[in-house]
Image (spheres, helix red, strand yellow):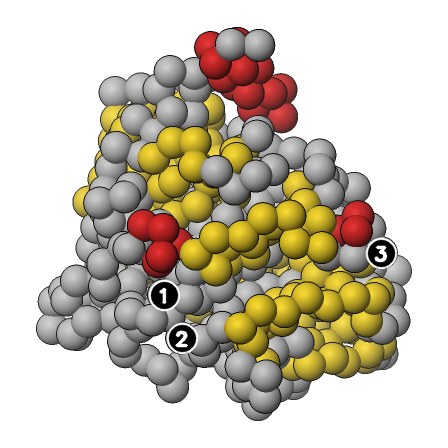
């Protein structure tokens, strides 16, 4: 098969998978932000079944330092973190029901990236969430110091390929910005499987985004954009008037890059959005042709853009913001949890309701029964009604005491009727 035919097959495969890519089993949580990579799950919250009354801890495990979230595929849970005793990044496969270890893999690693600076007391270890590919059974991880690995989950996690992004591409330290000084957290963004590619935010002259062959790790293309990395949770698939694309919030704003045949990595749209904190931490939220950007500090806003083949158009901007939690769009509403739980109208940006009393750390899930599961601060769990069930005011159904003593930066996970919660020090709890 010639190169043109091969690329055409890849493009057709991406289109057949749709803008959200391949999905594993219905109860799985195989990617950053869930089965459809947007904070949604078809699973019920369990409220009607009484599962929030007398909720109990099923098991607890220590999986290593880092803001990386666990993922769940079938009856297996995968987690990665930095082990301070061994000075290694350690990937573990646990039984999702019991927490018992099935296998582990490890490699020597730094606690921080080699060019890291700033905020070492707020984070450490692996930040990027693993990415699972159901087509191959490969699991992809990215360490803070640039170790990009493909692991074969069908062979006990045997390493399929490996490379280091610092060694291969030497991205520069992120620039100083505003009044806050310089911050560089190393590599933080979850890789993204798109057809036969693994798309990774690298940053710098090598390319803001670089696509690798997911089976071999060989470089396939680089984005024409060369912005520094943005330190978000990861790039997000988006379809723009039928064109498969990927959106990412880099250091200076939004990039939407094309994935279609002959135009791989070409810039379709950009939008300026620089944060004085030198980080855009919340990921972009995609809903159809709409993209939401948010950060606090000098921006202190959430912005809704419409993406077309001609570029990005700002539709509205509201003076409510999230520094950490990525917004979730559901039923014409926008939700996030950062210090407060917010509900905005997607079309206008008007705030419909707000509920206070949450910490800086925050993540949010919309469940199949139109409810919101929040994890905030040091692991405070909250169940709330969405606007589909409570249109004019916030309605809290259940709220717990914090699970941890450290910040719960990792995203909360719902899979198979169980909640998985983790703090930045690697304490992982399964609740049933």
Q: How many marks?
A: 3
Which is more foreground, mark 3 or mark 1?
A: 1
Q: Circle 2 sits on which residue? A: 112
Reading the chain from its start, which is encountered first: label 2 or label 1?
A: 2
Badge nearest the viewer, 2 or 3? 2
**46 to the left or right of 183:** right
- Residue 432 located left or right of residue 16: right
> Which residue is rendered at x = 47% and y = 10% of the image?
4
Look at the picture and state if 200 lies above or below 373.
above
Question: Who's the residue at 37% across and 70% down the image?
Answer: 113
The residue at which mark 3 appears reads as 75
Q: Left or right: 339 with respect to 56?
A: left
Is there any visible trace of residue 213 in the rendered image? yes
Q: Are marks 2 and 1 in contact (CB under 8 Å)?
A: yes
Occupied quadrant, residue 290:
top left
Q: Which mark is residue 186?
A: 1
Asked where in the image residue 408 lies, by quadrant, the reply is bottom right
């Amino acid at each position: 098969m010639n190169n043109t035919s091969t690329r055409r097959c890849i493009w057709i495969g991406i289109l057949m998978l749709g803008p959200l890519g391949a999905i594993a089993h219905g109860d799985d949580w195989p990617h950053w932000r869930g089965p459809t990579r947007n904070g949604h799950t078809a699973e019920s919250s369990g409220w009607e079944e009484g599962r929030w009354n007398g909720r109990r801890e099923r098991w607890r495990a220590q999986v290593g330092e880092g803001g990386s979230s666990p993922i769940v595929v079938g009856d297996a849970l995968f987690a990665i973190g930095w082990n301070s005793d061994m000075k290694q990044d350690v990937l573990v496969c646990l039984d999702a029901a019991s927490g018992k270890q099935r296998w582990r893999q490890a490699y020597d690693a730094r606690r921080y990236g080699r060019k890291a600076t700033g905020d070492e007391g707020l984070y450490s270890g692996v930040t990027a969430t693993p990415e699972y590919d159901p087509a191959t059974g490969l699991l992809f991880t990215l360490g803070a110091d640039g170790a990009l690995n493909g692991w074969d989950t069908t062979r006990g996690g045997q390493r399929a390929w490996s490379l280091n992004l610092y060694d291969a591409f030497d991205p520069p330290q992120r620039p100083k910005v505003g009044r806050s000084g310089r911050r560089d957290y190393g590599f933080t963004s979850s890789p993204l499987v798109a057809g036969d590619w693994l798309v990774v935010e690298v940053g710098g002259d090598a390319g803001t985004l670089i696509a690798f062959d997911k089976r071999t790790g060989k470089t396939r293309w680089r984005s024409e954009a060369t912005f520094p990395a943005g330190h978000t949770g990861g790039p997000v698939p988006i379809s723009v008037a039928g064109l498969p694309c990927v959106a990412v919030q880099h250091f200076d704003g939004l990039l939407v890059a094309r994935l279609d045949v002959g135009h791989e990595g070409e810039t379709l749209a950009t939008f300026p959005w620089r944060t004085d904190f030198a980080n855009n931490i919340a990921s972009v939220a995609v809903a159809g042709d709409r993209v939401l950007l948010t950060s606090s500090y000098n921006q202190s806003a959430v912005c809704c853009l419409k993406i077309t083949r001609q570029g990005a158009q700002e539709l509205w901007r509201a003076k409510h913001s999230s520094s950490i939690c990525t917004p979730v769009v559901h039923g014409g509403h926008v939700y996030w949890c950062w210090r407060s739980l917010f509900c905005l109208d997607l079309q206008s940006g008007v705030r419909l309701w707000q509920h206070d009393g949450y910490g800086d750390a925050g993540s949010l899930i919309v469940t199949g029964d139109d409810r919101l599961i929040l994890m905030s601060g040091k692991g405070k769990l909250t169940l709330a009604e969405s606007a589909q069930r409570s249109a004019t005011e916030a309605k809290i159904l259940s709220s717990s005491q914090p699970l941890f003593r450290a910040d719960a930066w990792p995203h909360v996970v719902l899979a198979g009727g169980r909640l998985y919660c983790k703090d930045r020090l690697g304490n992982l709890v399964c609740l049933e």
